[in-house]
Image: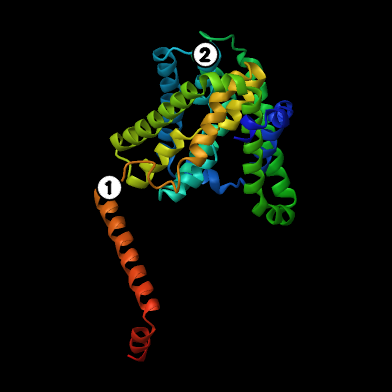
Amino acid sequence: MLGYFLPDAFRQLAPWIVTLLAVIMFGMGLTISPSDFREVLTRPLDVLIGVLAQFIIMPLAAFALTQTVPMPAEIAAGVILVGCCPGGTASNVMTYMARGDTALSVAITSVTTLIAPVVTPFLVWVFASAYLPVDAMAMFMSIVKVILVPLALGAALQWLLPTAVSRAVPVLPLVSVVGIVLIVAAVVAANQTAIAESGLLIIGLVVAHNVFGLALGYAVAKLLGMTEPKRRAVSIEIGMQNSGLGAALASAHFSPLAAVPSAVFSVWHNLVRGDGRELVPQPAARRRGRSRRRSGHAAALRRRRSLERNPIRLRRIRRR
């Protein structure tokens, strides 16, 4: 919203999009630990399922949308690019809030992020070359610079100065949020006119892409016999992309307009979701149980308010 209504103020941040993403990834490196990869060794099949689903479902869903819905080539390339990105760290938080397997989510995010320099450029070259020229090697170098190098530096600093890093960790989520907001605002500001003309189309594409990822991820996990917490982890992990990376790559290798789907994706999956518990299908028994708990809480609150309005009755109950 800020980027749309105050474009002149945020358009100046466009050259800093890559730097802002590097800062975010450096913060991720400060928090990464060997335990994040322990799940890869203890549950390799679960992690493999999540990684393969991530890099198969979302790129294919993006390509299917671009083949089905008429759209400008730049927007099509942007939709495919965000679909080929690894999972975002926000998926770990959303998995926790949705009572999914958070450890599995973190492991899948870590693995997809580390292999993204090779997999993402290849997939973008395969699916987006029909719309815009794709320099896969240049994109590979960009991802190494903006993802792997900051991650490595953050992890090294954590190893060298653990006490100082532990003190800084509590503010890292705020730094990440501010960084993503500035990236989105810069992309929106640079494309205000195009968004005014094609905003509804882009929003519809992003929502459809996201829903496909969530639904197909859950369906694949269920088909393979995974437990309910694992299904939620895989579903959310697939549905939520590293849209900051998508915006940075689109701005650097395609055009500002190609970065808009990533910016809209970021806003959609971080703000619209609420508490994250209704992201994926839930068993009917759990829904009924939660409904009964909510009804019980509401009834208790009504009784309490009634007693507060009747002090004489309240004193009698306390005497008992």
Which residue occupies 61% across, 45% down?
32
Disc 1/disc 2 C-alpha distance (Å)? 38 Å
What amino acid does circle 2 point to?
Answer: Ala
The residue under the point 65% across, 54% down is 170
Identify the secondary structure beneath mark 1: loop
Kindly indicate whether the residue at mark 2 contacts the one at mark 1 (C-beta within 8 angstroms): no
Which element type, helix, strand or loop, lies under badge 2? helix
**Residue at mark 1:** 283
| Residue at left offset 31%, top offset 67% | 299
Q: Nearer the viewer, residue 249 or 71?
A: 71
Q: Residues within 10 Å of mark 2 (few under 14, many from 20)?
A: many
Residue 129 in picture, x, y percent from top left = 53, 10
- Vertical order, 303 against 244 (above or below): below
Instruction: Please say whether residue 86 is visible from this viewpoint.
Output: no
Query: Which residue, given by chain and number where applicable, does mark 2 sit on?
Result: 128
Q: Residues within 10 Å of mark 1 (few under 14, many from 20)?
A: few
User: Residue at left 70%, top 48%?
Assistant: 158
- Outermost bottom residue: 319
Q: Position of residue 297 (x, y in %)?
A: 34, 65
Picture quadrant where residue 194 is located: top right
Instruction: Describe the colour scheme in one phrase.
Output: rainbow
Q: Say which mark, if any, is on residue 134.
A: none
What x and y, as percent, mark residue 120? 55, 23
The quarter of the picture where the N terminus appears is top right
Query: Going from the N terminus, do you reach mark 1 or mark 2 first?
Result: 2
Asked whether the viewer can see residue 204, the reply is: yes
Please, what is the three-letter code of the amino acid marked with disc 1? Pro
Quadrant of the frame with the C terminus: bottom left
Give the quadrant of residue 125: top right
Where is residue 141 drawn, in percent x and y? 67, 22
